[in-house]
Amino acid sequence: MDIAKQLVGIAIRNGASLAGIADMETIKNSPSHLIYTKLGRYEGKATVKSDHNLPDSQLFNWPDSAKSALVIGLSHPESHPELDWWWQGGTPGNRLLIDIMNRSQQQIENDLKINTVKIHYYVEQGGLFLKDAAVLSGLGCIGKNNMLVTPQYGPRVRLRALLLKAELEPTGPVNFDPCSGCKEYCRKICPEKAMAKKTPLFDCIDCSTDLPARDGKYNRENCNERMDKDILATTNSPSTKQNPVKFCRKCELICPVAKNSRKQ
Ligand code: SF4
Ligand code: SF4
C-alpha cells in the first residue's frame, strides 16, 4: 500500500472522520496564505490576542524539511452539538481532534518512520490555514458559507493538521462543487448578513473563485458581532454554574449537503 494511504488509514483508525495529504509548497501558495500577507492582520474572535502573535517574519515559517501535511477532519453533526460548545478554553470536539492527532503522530513516527512537526492550531502561533490545506488534500471545497464543505458531512467538520518530513503524493484536490446551483440557504439565514455583499476589504486583491466565500462575500466582522452576542448570552445566563458558549452555526447547519446521510 502506498504511504499516503497508510497515513490516511492511521488517522481514520484513530477516530478521524476524514483524512488526506497535501503538498506544503502548494499550501504556501494557496489563497488564504497569499491573501493574508496582502491584507495584514485580520484577526477575529477565533484568533489569539496580538501580544501572543508571532512576528510577521515567523508567520508561515515552517521547516523546509516539512514537505507534506496530513489533514484530518472530525464530524460535528447537529445531533451532537456539545462537540462544538466552547468551555474551559476549548471545545470537546477539539480535544478529541488533539487526541486523534497525538496518537496518529506517534504511530506515523514509530511504524512508518516518518518524522513529523506538530503545529499550533492558530495561524498567529505557527499554524496553517486549515481550510486551504483540507481542500488541497481532497477533503472538499470552499463553500459560499466560507467553510470547508465535504461530500460526506457537508460543512459540519472541524480540522487539524500535522506536518510530515516526507514528499508524498497529495490526495486532492477533488472535483466537488455543491454550491453552484444551490439556493444559498447559508447566506440567507445569517442573522448578521455576513455574506450579503462583497466585503470592500477584498477589493484590493485579484479576485479568484477561491477568495473568502468564493466571491469575497464574507464579512468576518459581522460574524464576530454574533460571537460577541453569543458570549454575552452565556455570561448573562441566570445559572450559577459555568455554562458553555454555544456559538452560532446557522450557516453551517442549514447547508443541505450530506444532511440526510447516515454519516450525519
Ligand atoms: S447552503 Fe448551498 S451555497 Fe451554502 S455552503 Fe451549502 S451548498 Fe453551498
Ligand atoms: S456563524 Fe452565524 S453569524 Fe457567522 S456567518 Fe454563519 S450564520 Fe452568520
Image (cartoon, rainbow, N blue to C red):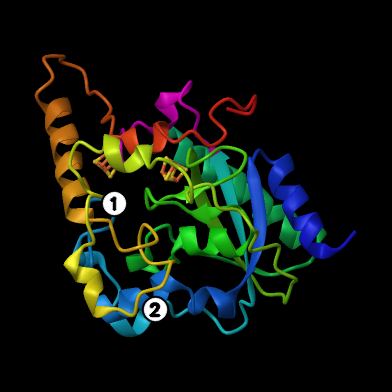
Q: From the image, tell me which residue sits under label 2.
A: 34
Highlighted range, magenta: 75-90
- Above/below status of 192 relative to 60: above
Residue type highlighted by circle 1? Ala
Residue at image position (32%, 33%) is: 250
Crowding at mark 2 (Cα within 10 Å: few <14, some 14-19, many 20+): few
Question: Residue 90: in sight, yes or no?
Answer: no
Instruction: Label 1: state its secondary structure.
Output: loop
Q: Position of residue 162 (x, y in %)?
A: 58, 61
Question: Residues under labels 1 and 2: Cα distance?
Answer: 20 Å
| Horizontal relation, residue 141 to residue 175: left or right | left
Query: In terms of sequence position, does the residue under pointer 1 or pointer 2 come before the other?
Result: 2
Q: Position of residue 21 (x, y in %)?
A: 67, 63
Q: Position of residue 263 (x, y in %)?
A: 63, 28
Query: How many numbered marks have been drawn onto this rendered protein structure?
Result: 2
Residue at image position (20%, 41%) is: 227
Labels 1, 2: front one: 2
Residue at image position (37%, 48%) is: 145
Ligand 1 under 8 Å from disc 2 Cβ: no
Q: Position of residue 87 (x, y in %)?
A: 31, 33
Ligand 2 under 8 Å from disc 1 Cβ: no
Quarter of the image where the C terminus is located: top right
- Above/below status of 74 relative to 211: above
| Horizontal relation, residue 31 to residue 169: left or right | left
| Horizontal relation, residue 36 to residue 191: left or right | right
Residue type highlighted by circle 2? Leu
Residue 21 or 244: which is nearer the viewer?
21
Instruction: Determine which quarter of the picture holds residue 83.
Output: top left
Question: Residue 109: in sight, yes or no?
Answer: yes
Q: From the image, tell me which residue sits under label 1.
A: 46
- Which residue is at the far top? 239
Quarter of the image where the N terminus is located: bottom right
